[in-house]
Image (cartoon, rainbow, N blue to C red):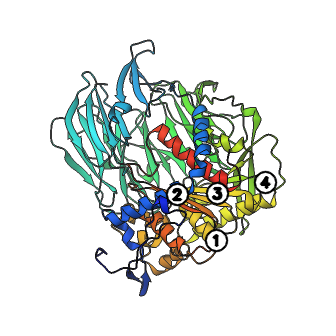
Amino acid sequence: MKTLLGVCCLSVSILSAAEAPMPPVAKQVPHTQTWHGQTFGDPYFWLREKQNPEVTAYLKAENAFTEAQTSGLKAFQEGLYKELLGRIKQTDLSVPTFDNGFFYYSRTVEGQQYPVFCRRKGSMEAPEEVYLDQNELAKGKAFLGLGDRSISDDNARLAYTTDETGYRQYTLRVKDLATGRLLPDTAERVTSVEWAADGKTLFYATEDPVTKRSNQVWRLRLGSQPELVFEEKDELFGVNLARTRDRKFLVLALASTDTYEMRILASNQPEGAFKAVLPREKGHKYEVDHRDGLLYLRTNKGAKEFRIVTAPVDNPVEGAWKPFVEAQAGVTVEGLDLFQGFAVVTEKREGLNRFRIHDFAKGTWREMAFPEAVYAAFAGGTPDYASPTFRFGYQSMVTPSSVYECDLATGAQKLLKRQDVLGGYDPKDYVTERLWATARDGMKVPISIVYKKGFKKDGKAPLFLYGYGSYGAGMPASFSSSRLPLLDRGFAYAIAHIRGGDELGERWHEDGMLMTKKNTFFDFIDCAEYLVKAKWTSRGRMVAEGGSAGGLLIGAVVNLRPDLFKAVHAAVPFVDVMNTMMDASLPLTVGEYLEWGNPNEKAAFDYMLSYSPYDNLKKGAYPAMLVTTSFNDSQVMYWEPAKYVAKLRTLKTDKNPLHFKCKMEPAGHGGASGRYDALKDRAFQLAWLMARVGITK
C-alpha cells in the first residue's frame, strides 16, 4: 500500500500536556480502499506509519494528555502500587523440580526485576549453580523477555532465547554451563528449541520476518552452519518443537485452528528426518506422546471432545488404534501426562479440570479430589519420566497459587508451597461462587465471582467484570493478589466464561468463532445484565476489562451497549478488525482466518464488518474509557487502538473521559517485562477504574 507521507491533509492539532484539558486531535488524511466492490474511507490509516515522526508526536501527545488528566490520581496510584507490592514476597524461591540428575528452581531477590534460574546436582544440599540470571541479561535494557530454555541431555549446555524490544522476536544463544561462556552459535527469530540426545545437535524453529508465522525448522550441529530440515508452506499452519517425556522422540507439531499434524524423530538419530505420525486431515486434531514402545494419541477423530488411543510406533494408522481413554458425554479430554509406571489424564467437566491416574501395573484408575467447588487446577512441573509423583498447580479465587504433589501409587496429596500473600491476607475473609447466567439464546453461561464477606447484594456495590472469549482459551477461576485492593474496597470481581473459550468444551469455542462470533459479545452483555438484575451491582457501578481479543470484546460490547458500564479498560485491543484481516502481510493475519473468518469471502467479510469495533463507532454517548497499548506490540499493532481512539474522539458526545496510554519504551503485548514496572502499570489501571465509581483512596 502506498505511503501517505506528503499527501495533503486536514489541519492537525496535537496538544501538549500544558494545554490540557483539550485532548489531542489526530490529523485526517484522505485514504480509501475498495473491498468487495465497496469503497471504504479511513482518514486515520496514516497512523500505521511507525517511522513517521508525526505518528510518534501524536502518541506522545495522547500520553501527555492522559498524564495531565489523571494527575489527581497520582497519590492513589502510588498508594495502590505500595499496596500491591506489599502483598508480594519479594525475595522468594520456587519449588525445586527434579530433572535428569539436577534440582531446578528459580528465585527472586528484593529490588530485582527478574528471576534468577538455578540448579543443584543430586540434592538441594549441593552447591547452587546459577545457570541464567535474567537481571544480568537485562542490565542497561528497558525490556528483557525470556523465551525458550532447554538444557542438553548431558547437562553441559543451555540453549535460551531473549527479546529486547517487546516485539517477540527472540534471539537464540547457547551457553557452556561449565565455563559460563557463550558459544558462537546463534540464530534470529527463534520460536522454539529442543536438543537431540547427543547434546551437540540443536533443533530450532524460526518465524517469517514479516508475518511472524513460525514456519521453518533447522538442525544445528554446534560449531557448524544450521541446516533447514523442514518448511511449512501452508500459511494456515505454524510449527513448534517439543520432546516426549521419556526423551526418546523429538516432536514437530504443525497446527492450524482446526487441524494438527505431528511428526516425530528418534532423538538419538538427529541426522534422520521427521516422519508424520498420521497424514494431515482437515478437521483432525491430535497430539502425541510415547511410552514403552507405544504412541499415545489424544485425538478428536470419532470424539468431538477428544479421546486417547495407543498405536504402534511403526504403524500408527487408525486401524491399529487401541482405546486408552474413551470419550464421555460432558467431558473434554484436555491432556495426558505419561510416566514410566503411571499416566495422568486431565479432563474438564462443567468448566473445571480434574485428574485421573492410571496404574499400568494394576490396570486401575483413580480420580483425584479437590476441596473447593470452584477452582483452577493445572498439570505440570514433573519432567522426570521415572517420577513416582505427579505435580500440579491448584488455586481458586480465594486460595493463592499452590503447588501440590500427588503420590501416583496411593493418591495421597502433599502441599509443597502456597504463594505467600503478605499484608494479613486470610482466605476465610473472602467468598467465591459459581453463577450461571442465561444468554438470550437460552445457553447457560458460567460466571466465577469473588467478594469479601459482608458484601451486600443490594445493587449498590461496585463490580469488576472481566472477559476474553476467543481462540478456545478459557479463563480459569484463578487467584490474583492484585484483585485484593478491589475486594477490600467493596468490589465484587467476576469472570464471565463466555463462548469462544473452552470452558465447556470444544462446542464452547465453536459457538463463539467464525460466523457465531457475536455470541461472545452477547454472552458478555447478558452476563452483565444478569449481575445487575440479581443486584450484585448496577449499571452505574459496574466496570469492565478485557485485553487483546478481550479488547475486541470490550470494543464490540461498548458499541452494542454503551449504557451498560460506567467505565471500561481495553488493553492492547484488537479493534481494527477489517484493516488487519484484509492485510495478509501483517503478523498473524492469515493463520487467523480459521478463527475469525476469511474476509476475502463476502459472507465472512460482511459478518466481520458488522461487529468490528473501529468500523462500527458512531456518534453518541460512550462510557469512560481507558485504552492501553505498547508501541512495539507484535500481536496487536499499536495503530489499532490509536486509530480507534482518534476516531472515537470525533464521535463521542458525552463528557466521560477517554484516555489513551501507549508505552513508547520497549514493551510487548503483555506490557512491561519487569515485575515492578508491571505492578506500576496495574496500579494506574486500577486507580483509574476505581475512580470512575468514586473510590479514590
Q: Which of marks 3 and 1 is in front?
A: 1
Q: In which quarter of the image is the C terminus?
A: top right
What residue would you read off at disc 2?
Answer: 66
What residue would you read off at disc 4?
Answer: 536
* Pointer 4 with pointer 2, Cβ within 8 A: no
* Pointer 3 with pointer 4, Cβ within 8 A: no
What residue would you read off at disc 3?
Answer: 544
Q: Which of marks 1 and 4 is nearer the N terminus?
A: 4
Residue count near mark 3 (Cα–Cα under 10 Å), binned few <14, some 14–19, many ≥20: many
Q: Which of marks 3 and 4 is nearer the N terminus?
A: 4
Element type at mark 4: loop
Q: What residue type is labelled 2?
A: Thr
Q: Residue 169: horizontal and vertical position, in percent?
A: 33, 49
Q: In this picture, is 686 found above or below 107? A: below
Residue count near mark 4 (Cα–Cα under 10 Å), binned few <14, some 14–19, many ≥20: many
What residue would you read off at disc 1?
Answer: 654
Q: What residue type is labelled 1?
A: Asp
Q: In this picture, is 649 found above or below 508? A: below
